[in-house]
Image (cartoon, grey):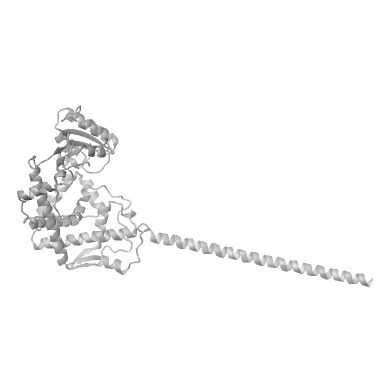
């Protein structure tokens, strides 16, 4: 997916931020089954070693968080790559995920007290919306659920917590008032350099992905992708509305915005696409409203529509369309984000938290390995033991052979000495006989 939005051309230092609790990131892991790449079937779960998934990882005000939930979150976030983690990395991942789950539980308990728990109908509606937006078939949805280690019951519980905390956010931050004109002007005057609409273009795109991503696409390989490209181009050439075709046929999340990619500066185009594509879009020969043929970029096919072209950098003022409302929205969202984070920090301080997993690490500081891949310690120990055993056996065998050779040499020497003595005695006898004669 390519989406570059710079505040209608304004530099990235002024953004239209979406306020959220710092915890919302872990809640979103539930939705990975709808958007993430399939996990590796050869690595169905993290290598837990001697970890008991039914063990209690932590408690929040007496409410247990099972290690099973930690392992499930790691599996979802790593997308089948958990087997590549070392024992040290896996231990760190567990602690980080557990900390997120603790924060989630703290805020959910707050949501219960503030009575912001969603109804069953709201939960069902949210799940159905995610299914529809993902474009997954029933079979693919069930497959993703299985790969993620999720049941419908667990999914509903996760969505319930997510919606409850979102409602809590809205309730807490509802006290934030709109900024005054003087505050808006002060923000603008302090960030004038940021209010520049750079030379560039506004684009929309229809993206065809040959890969089977399971995100609502119908193409599974290069051949099917090329056929779909031809079908899409034929629709557009026949007069079909570009935005409508993007919504129905694009295989990219931008289809939810009718293919809109937003404003892209000339420099960003050169970095994201190529200098040739940037030059083509900025050329007067390519008219606003024109549609490109399919352009291969990063293994996908892009059909672009040039919606607007900005010929030169433009300084924006408070009177420029949309600037004053956007500054107001930015200030409100920044205040809401600060308020929500402060509220969450206080909630964490008030909660009684017992982190058993962290305590286990403290109690057993020498059990972790930072170099070897997870699950290979025992194998390497066995290999080392076998190697040592073989070495010892070979050494003993060699020592035995050397001792045998030494004994053999000793016998040879003894025999040689005996023969020499016998010969000497014979010579003495011969000499005595000669004297007598």
Compared with 302, 380 (above or below) is: below
Height in image: 292 above or below 84?
Answer: above
Whether 310 is drawn above or below 422: the answer is: above
Q: Quadrant of residue 266?
A: top left
Residue 9 visible in image: no
User: x%, y% of residue 40?
Assistant: 30, 50
Number of on-image labels: 0
In-image side of 150 versus 346 (left or right): right
Name the side, left or right, on which 377 lies relative to 319: right
Give whichever of 68, 97 is nearer the camera: 97
Q: Residue furthest right?
A: 437
Q: Quadrant of the N terminus?
A: top left
Give the percent coordinates (x, y) of residue 428: 85, 71
Of residues 54 and 410, the one nearer the viewer is 410
Residue 26 x %, y %:
20, 55
Say which of 263 and 239 sits in front.
263
Q: Name the quadrant containing residue 238.
A: top left
Q: Residue at x 75, y 68 (%)?
A: 417
Measuring from the top left, give residue 86's x and y in whole percent: 34, 57
Check the image and report above or below for 399 versus 258: below
Q: Is residue 428 left or right of residue 335?
A: right
The residue at the point 43 percent across, 61 percent down is 382
**Can residue 95 be seen?**
yes
Q: Quadrant of residue 310?
A: top left
Specify the quadrant that holds the C terminus: bottom right
């Amino acid at each position: 997916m390519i989406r570059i939005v710079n505040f209608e051309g304004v530099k990235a230092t002024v953004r239209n931020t979406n306020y959220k609790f710092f915890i919302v990131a872990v809640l979103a892991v539930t939705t990975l089954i709808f958007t993430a790449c399939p996990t590796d079937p050869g690595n169905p779960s993290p290598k837990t070693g001697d970890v008991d998934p039914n063990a209690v990882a932590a408690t929040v005000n007496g409410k247990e968080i099972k290690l099973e939930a930690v392992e499930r979150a790691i599996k979802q976030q790593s997308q089948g790559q958990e087997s590549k983690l070392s024992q040290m990395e896996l231990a760190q991942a567990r602690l980080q995920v557990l900390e997120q789950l603790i924060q989630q539980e703290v805020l959910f308990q707050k949501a219960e007290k503030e009575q912001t728990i969603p109804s069953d109908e709201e939960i069902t509606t949210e799940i159905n919306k995610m299914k529809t937006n993902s474009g997954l078939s029933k079979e693919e949805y069930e497959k993703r659920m299985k790969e993620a280690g999720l049941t419908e019951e667990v999914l509903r519980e996760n969505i319930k917590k997510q919606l409850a905390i979102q409602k809590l956010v809205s309730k807490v931050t509802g006290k934030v008032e709109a900024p005054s004109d003087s505050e808006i002007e002060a923000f603008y005057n302090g960030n004038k350099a940021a209010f520049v609409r750079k030379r560039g273009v506004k684009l929309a795109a229809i993206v065809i992905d040959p890969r089977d991503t399971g995100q609502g696409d119908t193409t599974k390989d290069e051949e099917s992708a090329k056929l779909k490209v031809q079908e899409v181009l034929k629709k557009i050439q026949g007069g079909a509305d570009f935005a409508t075709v993007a919504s129905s046929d694009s295989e990219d999340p931008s289809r939810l915005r009718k293919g809109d990619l937003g404003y892209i500066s000339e420099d960003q185009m050169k970095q994201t696409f190529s200098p040739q594509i940037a030059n083509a879009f900025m050329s007067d020969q390519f008219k606003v409203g024109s549609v490109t043929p399919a352009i291969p970029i990063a293994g996908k096919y892009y059909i672009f529509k040039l919606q607007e072209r900005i010929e030169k950098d433009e300084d924006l003022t408070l009177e420029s369309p949309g600037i004053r409302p956007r500054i107001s929205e930015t200030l409100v969202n920044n205040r809401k984000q600060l308020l929500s984070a402060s509220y969450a920090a206080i909630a964490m301080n008030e909660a009684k938290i017992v982190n058993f997993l962290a305590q286990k690490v403290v109690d057993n500081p020498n059990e972790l390995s930072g170099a070897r891949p997870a699950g290979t310690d025992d194998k390497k120990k066995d290999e080392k033991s076998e190697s040592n055993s073989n070495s010892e056996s070979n050494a003993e065998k060699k020592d035995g052979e050397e001792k045998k050779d030494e004994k053999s040499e000793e016998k040879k020497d003894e025999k040689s000495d005996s023969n020499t003595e016998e010969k000497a005695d014979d010579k003495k006898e011969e000499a005595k006989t000669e004297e007598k004669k």
